[in-house]
Image: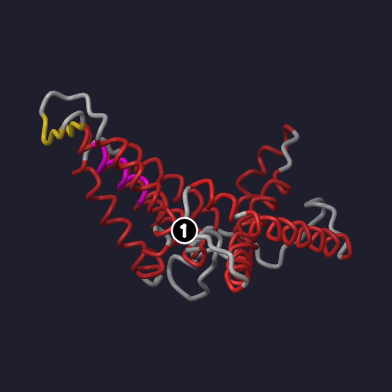
């Protein structure tokens, strides 16, 4: 399951989505999240699905990789679905078994909120899979640069977020290696009750935290050895510029939001 985490990974290929400006991709991701939350009914997700399918096709990302990003969330998806399904407040009942009652509005809310979570995860994964960590840092810093006038550390914030994203696949791979090593020594992570499973995670978490602190220390020493002192006076090899493709992408996102809003008003 640890290898199924795609957040923070970068898939290096050439595609129209990869070539977009990182600032545009960040703003487009925010716009996509807004569009997902504006949907109020199941038919409203039709343009969301079409837009997401188009983006995945243009980005040339493997479909199995996008589906794999949902596997670590399957427990959360089931919990979200069940929690909303059994707590409907409408009058029309679909199923009753003793004290368990499934109502129509509860089932619709369960499907809607589960679909919303799926779209948010897949949409966010497209951003990290199509944007290199260094490029993502530049985009975040440029977007937050106006806040420097009020003393906001835009460069440091962007650097910390990008390092966190970059270390997700690294720590995931490290956790997978430790889990296999502990399993070879007789550790069992899959059987027993909740307390037993939590206790079995201690041999995994302790070396993982030690490895994470060691990597953080090595990274700090490497940055100090290269005279890193923040974004002051920093120059860039590649200057970010908006191009025609970015304008087309912004237009497509504006059209998506307009369709979602119009569809919500017509219902």
Give 256 or 94, whichever is nearer the viewer. Answer: 94
| Quadrant in which the C terminus is drawn | top left
Q: Is mark 1 on a helix, strand or loop?
A: loop
Q: Residue at x 21, y 24 (%)?
A: 89
> Horizontal placement of 241 versus 237: left or right?
left
Q: Name the residue under label 1.
A: 191
Magenta stretch secondary structure, dominant: helix
The colour scheme applied to this rendered structure is secondary structure
In the image, is residue 178 above or below residue 31? below
- Give the percent coordinates (x, y) of residue 83: 32, 36
The answer to whether any part of residue 267 appears in the image is no
Residue 131 shows up from this direction: yes
Left or right for 6, reference 257: right
Residue bounds of the magenta highlight: 109-118
Q: Report the residue at 34% width, 43% height from top.
A: 36
Q: Residue sitting at 77 percent across and 58 percent down?
A: 216
Find residue 35 and report its horizontal and vertical position in percent: 35, 42
The x, y position of residue 65, in whole percent, is 41, 68
Comparing 209 with 98, the one in front is 98
Residue 110 magenta-highlighted: yes
78 horizontally vs 151: left or right: left
Does the stretch in magenta take in 24? no
Farthest bottom residue? 13
Q: In this view, does 265 lie above or below 143?
A: above
Q: Which of 245 and 182 is in front in this view?
A: 182
Considering depth in this image, is 119 or 18 the residue closer to the camera?
Answer: 119
The image shows residue 19 at horizontal and vertical percentages of: 49, 67
Crowd class of label 1 (few under 14; some 14 to 19; many from 20; radius 10 Å): few
Residue 210 quadrant = bottom right
Q: How many numbered circles does the render carry?
A: 1
């Amino acid at each position: 399951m640890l290898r199924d985490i795609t957040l923070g990974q970068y898939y290096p290929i050439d595609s129209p989505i990869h070539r977009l400006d990182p600032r545009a991709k960040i703003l487009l991701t925010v716009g996509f999240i807004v569009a997902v939350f504006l949907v109020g009914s199941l038919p409203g997700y039709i343009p969301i699905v079409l837009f997401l399918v188009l983006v995945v096709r243009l980005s040339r990302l493997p479909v199995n990789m996008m589906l794999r990003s949902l596997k670590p969330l399957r427990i959360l998806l089931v919990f979200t679905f069940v929690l909303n399904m059994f707590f409907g407040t409408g009058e029309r009942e679909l199923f009753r078994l003793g004290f368990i009652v499934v109502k129509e509005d509860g089932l619709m809310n369960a499907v809607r909120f589960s679909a919303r979570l799926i779209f948010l995860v897949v949409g966010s994964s497209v951003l990290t899979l199509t944007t290199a960590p260094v490029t993502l840092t530049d985009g975040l810093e440029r977007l937050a640069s106006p806040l420097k006038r009020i003393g906001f550390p835009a460069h440091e914030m962007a650097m910390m977020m990008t390092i966190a994203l970059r270390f997700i696949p690294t720590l995931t791979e490290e956790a997978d290696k430790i889990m296999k090593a502990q399993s070879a020594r007789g550790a069992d992570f899959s059987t027993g009750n909740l307390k037993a499973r939590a206790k079995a995670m201690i041999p995994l978490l302790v070396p993982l935290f030690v490895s994470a602190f060691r990597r953080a220390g090595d990274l700090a020493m490497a940055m100090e050895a290269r005279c890193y002192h923040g974004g002051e006076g920093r120059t860039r090899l590649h200057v970010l510029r908006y191009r025609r493709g970015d304008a087309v992408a912004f237009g497509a996102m504006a059209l998506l939001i307009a369709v979602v809003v119009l569809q919500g008003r017509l219902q």
